[in-house]
Image: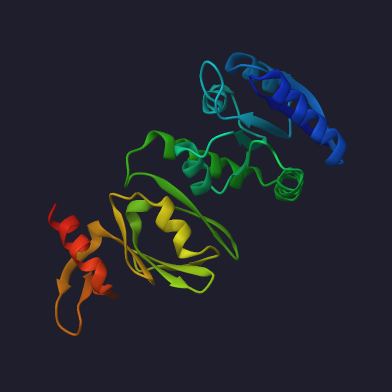
Amino acid sequence: MLRAVIIEDERHSRETLKNLLNEYCEGVEVVGEADSVTNGIKVIETSSPDVIFLDIELQPGTGFDVLKGVSRVNFETIFTTAFEQYAIQAIKLSSLDYLLKPISIDDLQAAVQKCKSRRNENQYKQQMDVLLNQLSQKDGDRKICLSTSDGMEFVRESDILFCKANGSYTDFKFRDGRCLVVSKHLKEYEDLLAPNQFMRVHNSYLINLKEVKKFVKSEGGYILMNDDSMVSISPKKRDEFMERMVG
């Protein structure tokens, strides 16, 4: 049985989620509820949940304040929110789960099933560290969680040299020469990685602008990275690239 806690400042939202869990998610028992940051911390400490459903926007404060306030994060967290906002980006980069309100039954069941099958405390702690790092660090110092066929890799954005599209996958090349195949489209990382540091210069390439060595005009034009990798650049991207490099 999965022990669940719901932390949500609106009563009707707590009741709705509780009813959905009771009706559609077998093997889940709601053992506690809270309507604020302070009460959320208390109910987590006293009920020892396996998973918490945590509203991002609590009044006053946020769900992240709850996570920072507990003595130990030894439970799964499924975030809930009514808004696509900056926090969603941090959650995606951490490969954590979130549900958009109004919550769909299918999405809720999928999130609960992943929670039941995942239960790796060390990996989860690293994901949570990435999330809190995302929310507190400046671009370039932030960490990102990359899902691979073997599990998850935790890397700094500043260590990424470039990303290359590979069908429904993305090939990551790092400053130390390592390569990693990640099971997500390049477009997703274009939306997530720091926009002031990374640029999509071609349909196949997303590069770290701080790792560019030079732009070569011959042979139709290409970018030479610090490791001497040659990266194609789309003609329509050249002006923007040059502006960003000299700006």
- 120 vs 176, left or right, is right
Q: Quarter-wise, where is residue 73 in the image?
A: top right
Q: Residue furthest bottom?
A: 219
Q: Is residue 93 visible?
A: yes
Q: From the viewer's side, name the closer residue of 105 and 230.
A: 105
Q: Quarter-wise, where is residue 214 in the image?
A: bottom left
Q: Position of residue 33 (x, y in %)?
A: 73, 21
Name the residue rendered at 65%, 38% in the picture.
Answer: 78
Name the residue rendered at 43%, 40% in the picture.
Answer: 134
Q: From the viewer's side, name the closer residue of 114 and 105.
A: 105
Q: Position of residue 112 (x, y in %)?
A: 75, 44
- 233 vs 58, left or right, is left
- Image quadrant holding the N terminus, namely top right
Name the residue rendered at 47%, 44% in the picture.
Answer: 89
Name the residue rendered at 60%, 66% in the picture.
Answer: 149
**Above or below 107: residue 42:** above
- 93 vs 53, left or right, is left
Q: Position of residue 127 (x, y in %)?
A: 54, 44
Q: Is residue 227 visible?
A: no
**Above or below 70: residue 51:** below
- 144 vs 33, left or right, is left
**Above or below 172: residue 106:** above
Give the number of marks: 0
Q: Position of residue 61 (x, y in %)?
A: 51, 19
Q: From the viewer's side, name the closer residue of 165 and 147.
A: 165
Q: From the viewer's side, name the closer residue of 66 and 175.
A: 66
**Above or below 15: residue 128:** below
Q: Which colour scheme appears in the figure?
A: rainbow
